Amino acid sequence: MAATVAYEDVEVGTELPGRVFPVDRATLVRYAGASGDFNPIHWNERFAREVGLPDVIAHGMFTMASAIRVVTDWVGDPGAVVEYGVRFTKPVVVPDGERGACVEVAAKVAAKLEGGLVRVDLTATCEGQKVLGMARAVVRLA
């Protein structure tokens, strides 16, 4: 599969369609099974509080993976992402119950590079708090 977005059709400042990713405790348990990360801070409220957290928190890699979906959905090919990195700034706290938490992700083209590459900067927030910092992806366009 190749990228469906053409380099010449993109300008610096182009905004990608944002997304909201709901996160509940069941999602965290499924992610733990898929990733092999069974750290109890991601599913055991009592343990999370004992180690000083406000509640159960989402896996950092889950949050990071959710955010990049904005880019892969836009470009049409996950293989078009040639570089991706973030800094974890705040945990995504996931309270028990139906509501859980939501991670809101926005992204825009920050730079056009050589060779059909663009840099996309992402912003991920939860409850108005930035949860990922320096979130950047380099993407190869068509």
Image (spheres, rainbow, N blue to C red):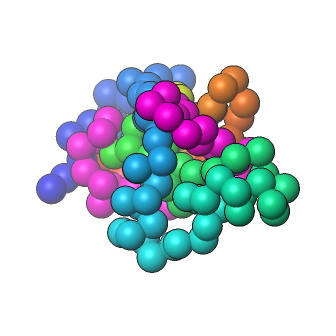
Viewed as shown, does residue 110 lie left or right of 90?
left
Residue 78 part of the magenta-drawn span: yes
Viewed as shown, does residue 69 lie left or right of 125?
left
**Percent x, y of residue 21:** 43, 35
- For the point 63% across and 32% down, which residue is it? 125
- For the point 45% across and 66% down, which residue is it? 32
Q: Quadrant of residue 42?
A: bottom right
For the residue pair 123 and 141, the one nearer the viewer reads as: 123
Q: Give the range drawn in magenta.
A: 73-102
**Percent x, y of residue 87:** 70, 54
Residue extending farthest right? 52
Residue extending farthest left? 1
Residue 79 seen in render: yes
Residue extending farthest front? 46
**Percent x, y of residue 84:** 53, 57
Decide: is 35 above or below 62: below
Number of marks present in the image shown: 0
- For the point 24% across and 43% down, which residue is it? 76
Decide: is 107 above or below 35: above
Q: In which quarter of the image is residue 34?
A: bottom left
**Percent x, y of residue 119:** 53, 44
Viewed as shown, does residue 29 lie left or right of 85?
left
Residue 137 seen in render: no
Viewed as shown, does residue 12 lie left or right of 92?
left
